[in-house]
Amino acid sequence: MDTSFKANPLAQPNPTAGLATRLGVRFGVGVGAVCALWMMGLQLTGNNGFGPKQILAQLLVPLVAVASQWILRRQLKPEKPGLGRSLGVGMLTVLVAALISAGSLVGLAYGAGEKALAVHRAEILEIVRAQQRENSKVELSPQQKQQQLQKVANVSVGDMAISNFTQLVLLGLVLAVPSGIFLRE
């Protein structure tokens, strides 16, 4: 008795199988690399590669997530991608980009050294102090103000990477989810 598996000779391979995964990974790696290069470029040009200017590259993530959903829809025509594939490609794009960006932030922190991290901490400290002075609506006790300043002074590379990852995921999903729902048909 022959128990070997024989493929159906009439079955044709599905060219769209794994398309959403391939697109999500491809677009996520691309925009994640752009975020990493942006941070590195900021650091090399004497700017704070860990600071608020990161947002300029991070704004690309939701746009690229929408682009991946749009490309998926175009490649599947006349078939519709459906909600699962449309949301999946956007979310995968965002997650891959966030992982690459956070990982590159850790690499940049270790490559730039403690001096660059100290400059970043000083910049954050200055921003927090300015917010404490300017924000008259929220009255903080001296103890709460001191706790805020202490937290900023003790910011670690891991804290910065988690913050970077969280920002990218939230920013990316804010646009990727509605566009995935819209582009499902």
Image: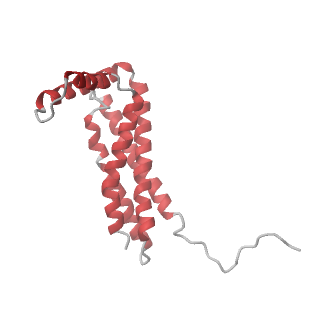
- The image position of residue 31, as x and y in percent, is 38, 48
Q: Quadrant of residue 134?
A: top left
Camera-side residue: 139 or 164? 139
**Residue drawn 44% across the image and 48% down it:** 96
| Direction from residue 146 to residue 2 in the image, left or right | right
- The image position of residue 100, as x and y in percent, is 44, 42
Camera-side residue: 113 or 30? 113
Q: Residue furthest bottom?
A: 10
**Residue drawn 34% across the image and 35% down it:** 39
- The image position of residue 155, as x and y in percent, is 35, 26
What colour scheme was applied to this rendering of the protein?
Answer: secondary structure
Is 173 drawn above or below residue 72 in the view shown? Answer: above
- The image position of residue 149, as x and y in percent, is 26, 23
Q: Say which quadrant the C terminus sits in.
A: bottom left
Q: Is residue 27 in sight in this rendering?
A: no
Is 35 drawn above or below residue 116 in the view shown? Answer: below
Q: Residue furthest right?
A: 1
Q: Is residue 103 in sight in this rendering?
A: yes
**Residue drawn 40% across the image and 58% down it:** 90
Camera-side residue: 22 or 172? 172
Q: How many marks?
A: 0
Q: Quadrant of residue 146?
A: top left
Q: Say which quadrant the N terminus sits in.
A: bottom right
Q: Quadrant of residue 103?
A: top left
Is 77 drawn above or below residue 52 in the view shown? Answer: below
| Direction from residue 23 to residue 3 in the image, left or right | right
**Residue drawn 31% across the image and 62% down it:** 178
